[in-house]
Image: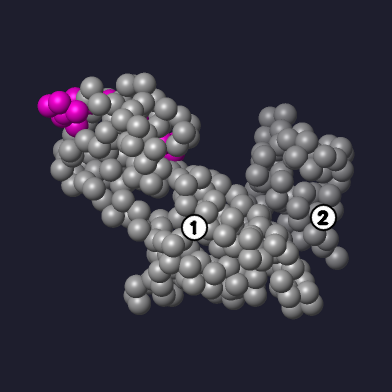
Amino acid sequence: MTTTGRLRTFVALADTGSVRAAAQQLVVTESSVSSAVSALAAEVGVPLIAKNGRGVRLTPAGERYASYARKILGLYAEATAAAHDVAEPGRGTVRIAAVTTAGEHVLPALLASFRARHPGIELRLDVAPRAAVWPMLAHHEVDLVVAGRPPDGLAGRTRAASPNTLVVVGPPADAPGFRPDLATWLLREPGSGIRATTAFLLEHLDADPRQMTLGSHGAVVAAAVVGLGVTLVSRQAVRAQIEDGSLVELPVAGTPLQRPWHAVSGCDPTPSTELLVRHLLAHPELGWRPPPSDQGQE
């Protein structure tokens, strides 16, 4: 019978791309990883990995199996949490994933408010780019995602929305006579939603300016403060810099942009997840409201 241990080992191999890296991630020996994956492939009855130089790669069948393995492991964790919720009300777990800006500037107040009223519920938070958080919900690896608008076809429920305004900011010295086409634009990492929105904005402006990619939201803001360029960012995320004068909002056609945050759960949320959703809607000071009717079910 397939064990969750074998599935976790196989997913670790799929995620890391090598037996050595998977062993390091799981804190086991390389031989244990190889043995577990070989036993799993024998059980499935088709090759899941193939040699690739000195390493290994997933076969097409292995890629497909890995997608199901993630869902199985996610559902297993979800089922365990749901059972604990029923057996011990108020002592469950909520697994949350958020894009970087939401994780750093939107969720802390919400989580602190919820924790103060429900200290027995464990909160787990993963912060990742947009391209990573939605698959986590689809694979049941998290119970709630906080990000921009969900992708079409996502099996989930939009539970709440919160305003989010995107503005272009830069150092005060750039403000006089600012021209977007002559500026250096600071971009987030590939897979970031704000990077995609910036590309859309520049296309709308018919501009092809210089660009610089940095690895995180914090790096982009810090680079803007020291004068390396300008960037499109959530106004919430740079409120302190605007107030202290180290950054200013710059006039760019098509901005500000309204890109609300969405809190999206799975289709069958656990009781603890429902409790968190009810909490954020019951406290208007947190900034959340029920979603528009056309976004109630995604």
Q: Is any atom of residue 283 visible in this view?
A: yes
Q: Is residue 152 above or below residue 271?
A: above
Residue 223: in magenta span: no
Q: Is residue 49 above or below residue 111?
A: above
The residue carrying mark 2 is 5
| Bounds of the magenta segment | 175-190
Q: Earlier in the sequence, mark 2 or mark 1?
A: 2
Outermost residue, left side: 177
Quadrant in the rendering for residue 72: bottom right
Write the residue at 74% across / 50% down.
Answer: 10
* Residue 243, x across and y down, in percent: 33, 37
Residue 185: in magenta span: yes
Image quarter where the N terminus lies is: bottom right
The residue carrying mark 1 is 146
Write the residue at 15% across / 29% down.
Answer: 179
Q: Amino acid at mark 2?
A: Gly
Q: Secondary structure at mark 2?
A: helix
* Residue 143, x across and y down, in percent: 60, 64
Q: Amino acid at mark 1?
A: Val
Q: Is residue 231 above or below residue 38?
A: above
Q: Secondary structure at mark 1?
A: strand
Residue closest to the eye, 181 or 13: 181
* Residue 150, x across and y down, in percent: 42, 61
